Amino acid sequence: MDKFTVLDLLDLELKEQNDLRLSCIGGRPGLEREIVVPDINRPGLALSGFFDNFGGQRVQLLGRGEYAYLQKLEGENNYDTIREFFTYSIPCCIFSHSLQPHPRFMELAEEAECPVLQTDLNSSEFATRLNRALGNIFAPTRIIHGVLVEVFGIGVLITGNSGVGKSETALELIERGHRLITDDSVEMKCVSGSIIIGSAANAVTGHHMEIRGLGIINISHLFGVGAIRDQKQVQLIVDLEEWDSSKVYDRLGTGDNITEILGVGIPTVTLPVKPGRNVPIIIETAAMNERLKKMGYYSAREFNQNILKWLESENARALYFQKKDIF
């Protein structure tokens, strides 16, 4: 990840429930300070003079409790701990509830060139939004060659060698009412250590597709905005490969094939491609089957258990008749 500064934090284009609603009220010379960790610190103990294990490299969030203590220090004309507070390389201070710090605090912040930001959100809501935003920014990333589509609510990553038909398969899925996230280059982000979010590696080309013999097409213009979305959790990988008659393919589906991306295991299906196979409808079926698995229903396992019960009943019946014949 490139350097992420306080100015970048202010410039984040987040919408609706993700909007941080930040504004800078002081310390503008320090807006180029880098944010190096995706964590927030509440500096109540530090302001009281206890700096052991102080998270000075974190964004400092000051709510009503910290603000009330700052007012108490102002009434006592005691600014020693505030001066010591600003000796640390703090990325920025953020006041929630639209709180306005007292002038002496602002003077010390200006002297230290530490940005002071303000939001009208309450502390808990702002902390949730900021943690989510920083988690996405600092999340481990990886670029994968493939096509990411949403099929029946399941994020399906279609992979395979060049020319195997990934884009054509995705185009047929879009024609059948499913949605495209991105074609060719998919940026993977590991969020919260267990979720892989896929989006376009390049926002400009994200909702375009390259079809050999046809060229570049704009999916949103051809099929409407309902045929696209910006990002989606990757929940299933479908690997397309040329049909190999010497290879034994899974015919029962009792095994769990997993592909690991950024430390997260994702269920994987290998589909052999040859003339006459309707790959899009197979992918639709795989997506619906994955939804059933997430609900706790495994078709292949149930089939296997039913076969075992049938064999056991047949063996018991045969043994019963054998004993009857003996007597």
Image (spheres, rainbow, N blue to C red):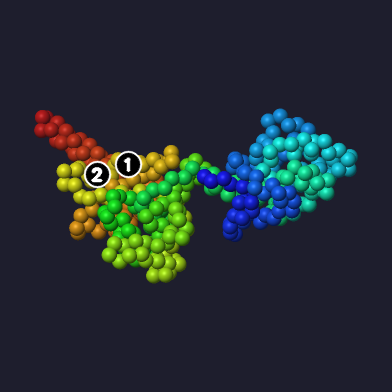
Which residue carries the number 1 mark?
257
The answer to which of 132 and 81 lies nearer the viewer is 81
Q: Amino acid at mark 1?
A: Asn
The answer to which of marks 2 and 1 sits earlier in the sequence is: 2
Tag 2 and tag 1, C-beta contact below 8 Å? yes
Where's residue 226, x and y in %? Answer: 44, 66
Residue drawn at the location 28% of the way across and 45% of the way down: 253
Which residue carries the number 2 mark?
250
Where's residue 63, x and y in %? Answer: 74, 46
Where's residue 265, x and y in %? Answer: 40, 41
The answer to which of 66 and 326 lies nearer the viewer is 66
Q: Is residue 161 visible?
A: yes
Q: Is residue 313 visible?
A: no
Q: Secondary structure at mark 1?
A: loop
Is residue 209 found left or right of 77 in the rendered image? left
Q: Quadrant of residue 65?
A: top right
Label 2 Cα crowd, 10 Å radius (few <14 / some 14-19 / many 20+): few
Q: Quadrant of residue 208?
A: bottom left
Residue drawn at the location 65% of the way across and 38% of the way down: 57
Is residue 183 found left or right of 132 in the rendered image? left
Relative vertical location of residue 222 with respect to residue 285 in this rendering, above or below: below
Is residue 141 found left or right of 112 in the rendered image? left
Q: Amino acid at mark 2?
A: Asp
Q: Secondary structure at mark 2?
A: loop
Cα distance in 3D space between marks 2 and 1: 10 Å
Residue drawn at the location 19% of the way across and 39% of the way down: 314
The answer to which of 18 and 12 lies nearer the viewer is 12
Give the position of the C terminus as an image quadrant: top left
